[in-house]
Amino acid sequence: MSSAGEHRIAGVGRLTPANPVRFTFDGKAYSGLQGDTIASALIASGVHLVGRSFKYHRPRGILSDGPEEPNALVGVRRDAARATPNVRATVQEIYDGLNAVSQNRWPSLSFDVGAVNDIASPLFSAGFYYKTFMWPKVAWEHVYEPFIRNAAGLGQAPTEPDPDHYAAQYAHCDVLVIGGGVAGLSAALAAAESGARVILCDERAAFGGALRFEAEARLDGKPGYDWAQDAAATLAAMDNVRILSRTTAFGYYAQNFVGLAERVTEHLAAPAADAPRERLWQVRAGRVIIAAGAIERHMVFANNDRPGIMLASAARTFLNHHGVAVGRKVGVYTANDSAYAAAIDLKKAGIDIPAIVDVRDNPQGSAIDEARAFGIRVLTGHAVTGTGGKLRVASMIVEPNKGGAAEIIPVDALIMSAGWTPSVHMFSQSRGKVAWDAATERFLPGTYAQDCVSIGACNGTDRLEESVSEAIAAGESAAKATRKRAKKSKVKIAVEGGGDWTGSMLGAGPNGANGKVIKAFVDFQNDVTAKDIRLAVQEGMHSIEHVKRFTTNGMATDQGKLSNLHGLAIAAEALGREIPKVGLTTFRAPYTPTTFGAIVGHARGELFDPARHTPMHESEVAAGAVFEDVGPWKRAWYYPRAGEDMHAAVNRECRTVREVAGMFDATTLGKIEVVGPDAAEFLNLIYTNPFLKLGVGRLRYGIMCREDGFIYDDGVVGRMAEDRFHVTTTTGGAPRVLQHMEDYLQTEFPHMKVWLTSTTEQWAVIAVQGPKAREIIEPFVEGIDLSNEAFPHMSVREGTFCGVPTRLFRMSFTGETGFEINVPADYGRQVWEKVYERGKSMGMCLYGTETMHVLRAEKGYIIVGQDTDGTVTPYDAGLGWAVGKNKTDFVGIRGLKRPDLVADGRRQLVGLKVKDGKTVLEEGAQIVADPNQPVPMKMIGWVSSSYWSENCGRPIALALVEGGFERMGRTLYVPMPDRAIEVEVTGTVFFDEEGGRING
Amino acid sequence: MLLIHCPYCEEERPEMEFRHAGEAHLERPKNIAEISDEAFAAYFFYRDNPKGVVFERWRHLHGCARFFNAARDTVSDKFLTTYKAGQPKPDLVGAANMNIPAKSGKSGK
């Protein structure tokens, strides 16, 4: 027995001594039993000190036995990549080889240097960080920031990427039951037996909730906990039920959409390699039954945070479930009857209970009578006003409330209860409004916002019998509401026993309020004391939201599950207002910390942002391309040869295209097939250009505006037939252009007979550009006369290319004779290889997006989104010729007439010639007229495109400049940190100004 | 995640399938080229932002791809109704649990 801890009591609890489990804590080996948490196993070995507090580094122990735990946070480490910080020791089950470490201490848990903060605590009162780090300014960089960064954060994150995978599943059900205690199980049974599809989840390893500690309750003649296991087994065997243990309902969203996080392998010594670590359930429920239970509160008194001081219900769980006594001499401090039940159970197990200190003057009830009958000394109208001990509580100081001598009672554990807080978190997350029940001093579900119902302890239903009948009714009615053929269930559960506790204490206890005493903790995790909250009120925080943020009460990872009501009560008292008038802060998801792994699921790495590849991608890789990201696409950027840097490669590619020819992958361009009797009419409205008279087989460069008159996208449109157009868009603009067109077609011009189809992925597009382009492609083409006369610039023909159907475009984004070969995407790579093979033998090169950019800039062709920024009109861009003068309507026609768009001084697209002939301007650089004006200078424009042009032998740039067209030939300046660069305003065409080459 | 009833598919589908598309019942003037600056501003720039019921457009992008209209309460985030594009603004006065703003909609729409 002692192998599983010397505080394990023979014959008590539900764990099997035959199943020992070995684990380590801070490197020391311990042994527990199958079914233990880290907390219960450590207490079994007499270990209460498990961590240091965040701010003051005070020694801290185990406060609770569940997910509400604020203190006992540990790191659990499987390996360097699987190290989870801030694991609640009260939730994490032990497994063979589990390796846990304490947090927030250095060099060791029992001797911690940071504990100096405790002595210096007057410096760290509420809001200290708003005051302390104000001055001198220089101290920020060297003193304050390093100090804060060092102190910030809780626990150690793993140093390597998470190697595990996380699953995700959507689920639909008629009834979702949150919480598998007696109420949740009863409701699930009733709903399931009525025929509803039910999901029942509980955050713990086993179902049963409060039945884990409530040893007296009997259901259907069985001990409560046994009944719960049987009920869970019954439910698990039903086809219409899914029951999920170790599964936390963490978020309640709109329309009964609830997020559940299932921890699949966290409790296993050797998880299967293919098992997900966690599974995210996204459940859409017809009706939600919230059976979340209640959370016991601690008492607020001086030094109430020493290890060994814990909630009464926790001590009772450790005893009745784990068979572990929390001490040999256990003091009790309470305002609620439930602590009596714990004391009696401990007493029965042979533990000494020196005294029950009850803050109430005259508590009545069977529990009190029974305690007295057991011979336990009951001190009513008394308070614990302090404790002794260092790394573990050693004594409690007891004083009568009406004054009198203090008594020091030696203890090695102290259990407490200030009453029970209904767990309204999920209800509140569902946007329900809580209502204050003055008689029982608690917030209960008030106005519902969604189709859900609260039952049992979270609904303020205290008696076991009432909880069960309420749960059965809720289950049946939920089934009836969500299932047409629901039948009445025959569920009947006989109930005997169960606690009937009253009593509540909100805020600080007697003398704990003493101004001299500053260590009466309200919020353990953030080290917030009663005094801090009073100080916040004193300093002018009158709303609970302000008090919360000033003191950080309730803002730790436990979200103040224990502390919120105490904090609220203390603030209300200090403000002289009633609690409901001060208000309760809103509960938000997640209910308990939820890992990024569970939320992210499969959406990481390549699946987070999938890359798109063109059909020719592998050929480009083989050719040595360097790629750049353009939206989701991987595009070949340049093709360096041995010894070439980017600059050299781009210069070579630029020269080769103009001297011989180059081949470029233009597949990523957006493509939309516009078909129907009104297709021309429709495009005429969408583009600024006239489209009605475009001949079949002809291409037109089109500009698309929004209604405000600014350029939205551009591209080449080909007329394939009277009623069929092949529209191209920019690479990044494809989805939004289709959306824009669909919007007009569906909602403004619904009378038009037009159909739009995205064909971006249907076509592979290979651009062949340069003086030898025709010669290169000629042998592959059938059915198309390639001569300049039959197939002039800006025309399109259908035929075959390498035997594959093609739409062959005669067009150019380089200013050279050019073709864009459209073939079905599946043939793209073969055609690419064929053309490359022939072209290469004739001196052709492959070129990437960088060379494409340079060549188009040499010709002054704009790139929407680079040379335009959403405030540029076609006129500003020097493309006024593309606006149909005789058109009576197109999208943007009215916007273009707006006063500001026709006013003088608009930024207009011009070329810039750098006077020194060698400096390449920085894209985005600002432009000024006078470099000697005082700072801040008046900026009259900016450089939108800038490159070294090997073909021109000098740098070239495009810029948007105020009144740019009027400034031709003028000198402007581009100020840089070291000097102002002198530039001359020019036209935008830098190469082959006559444009003869394109028609070659 | 909201569930949205697509009036074309006649099904409730998850919000992920849809894309919001701005205020509803803003009709592009037939003679847009001739309208005044004020009328253009009212059409293109000014939008209602009420606390309460809004009439807005959605597109069932990853479904039937149709644009449609919806009435949604911005306080409760609940959809009151959805209806096909081109249908008149529904008369929701008197519907339960509503926060209809005093001034709603655009003039002449």
Image (cartoon, rainbow, N blue to C red):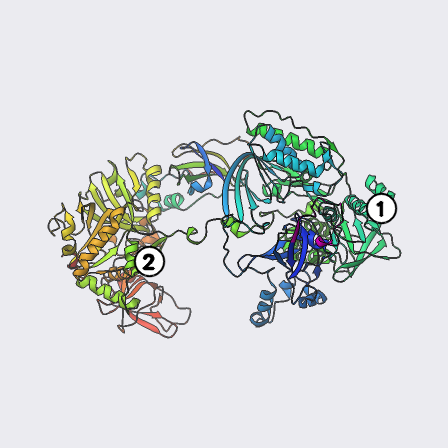
- Nearer to me, A955 or A881: A955
Which residue is outermost to the right? A404
Viewer-side residue, A278 vs A960: A278
Image quadrant occupied by the C terminus of chain A = bottom left
Span colored in magenta: A1-21
In this view, A116 is above or below A870: below
Q: Position of residue A414 (x, y in %)?
A: 78, 53
Eye-nearest disc, 2 or 1: 1
Q: Position of residue A242 (x, y in %)?
A: 56, 36
Q: Which labelled disc corresponds to residue A385?
A: none
The secondary element bearing badge 1 is classed as loop
Pointer 2 residue: A866
Q: Secondary structure at mark 2?
A: loop
Residue A543 visible in this rendered orientation of the protein: no
Q: Label 1 marks which chain's residue?
A: A
Occupied quadrant, residue A320: top right
- Tag 2–tag 1 contact (CB < 8 Å): no
Check if residue A573 falls in the magenta segment: no
How many angstroms separate mark 2 from mark 1 (CA)? 78 Å
Give how far across and how far down residue A373 sits, in percent: 87, 42
- Residue with the most extreme front position: A18
Q: Earlier in the sequence, mark 2 or mark 1?
A: 1
For mark 1, does the 10 Å Cα neighbourhood hold few (<14), some (14 to 19), or many (20 or more) residues? some
Of A542 and A522, which appears nearest the observer? Answer: A522
- Callout 2, which amino acid? Gln
From the viewer's perspective, tell me whether residue A491 is left or right of residue A747: right
Indicate the quadrant where residue A366 lies. top right
Task: Name the amino acid type tagged 1.
Answer: Asp
Res A361 label: 1
Which percent across, then down, holds residue A720? 20, 42
- Count numbered badges in the picture: 2
Residue A334 in view here: yes
